[in-house]
Image (spheres, rainbow, N blue to C red):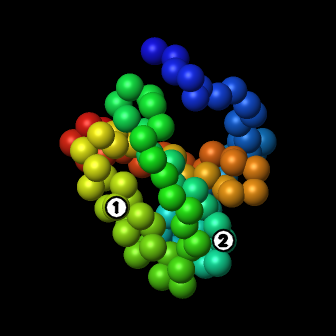
Amino acid sequence: RPGAYDEQGPVFIHADPCAGPSRGRGGYPFSRAGALRTVRRYSAEGHIVGGRLLEIPEDEEQGFDAAFDEAFADPRVALVHVRAVEYGCFHFEVRRRDTA
């Protein structure tokens, strides 16, 4: 069911086939130490229930994991969106394990 925060916009895809993200790198997409991201928390009904600013640390994976652990400690949070700070561009979504 559409909610107040539903968005429309372009989806960028590769024009030609590609191998996808580097398998050897690990971690999360669009992560670069020092970059700023918002971790926006949503309820199962699509309402924003919180969020935080994340400056990605040198240990990028640990930084995201800690932000997600913090978000999902709130039982109202069903999923989070990770976005760029500069223009609010959507990067990726993480869902609670027991609701995925």
Residue at 61%, 78% in the rendered image: 33
Give me the disc on residue 70: 1
Question: Residue at 68% across / 57% down in the picture?
Answer: 85
The foreground one among 83 and 41 is 41
- Taking 30 as reference, is 24 above or below it? below
Left or right: residue 35 versus residue 93 is right
Graded by Cα atoms within 10 Å as few (under 14), some (14 to 19) or many (20 or more), the crowding at tag 1 reads few
Say which label, 1 or 2, has the lower sequence index.
2
Q: Amino acid at mark 1?
A: Glu
Secondary element type, mark 2:
loop
Q: Write down the quadrant of residue 63 in the picture.
A: bottom left
Residue 59 shows in this picture: yes
Asked if residue 1 is positioned above or below residue 53 in the image, the reply reads above
SS at badge 1: helix
Mark sitting on residue 35? 2
Kindly give the residue lying farthest to the front in the view shown. 50
Residue that lies at the very extreme toward the top in this rendered image: 1
Nearest to the observer: residue 81 or residue 28: 81
Front tag of 1 and 2:
1
The total number of labels drawn is 2
Q: Is residue 59 above or below residue 46?
A: below
Question: Is residue 53 left or right of 34 when viewed as pictured?
Answer: left
Q: Position of residue 20 (x, y in %)?
A: 59, 55
**Three-letter amino acid code of the residue under disc 2:** Ala
Q: In screen coordinates, is 80 left or right of 89?
A: left
Residue 65, quarter of picture? bottom left
Q: Quadrant of residue 42?
A: top left
**Observer able to see residue 24:** no
Packing grade of label 2 (10 A; few <14, some 14-19, many >=20) is: some
Residue at 78% of width from left, 42% of height from top?
15
Alpha carbon distance from label 1 to label 2: 19 Å
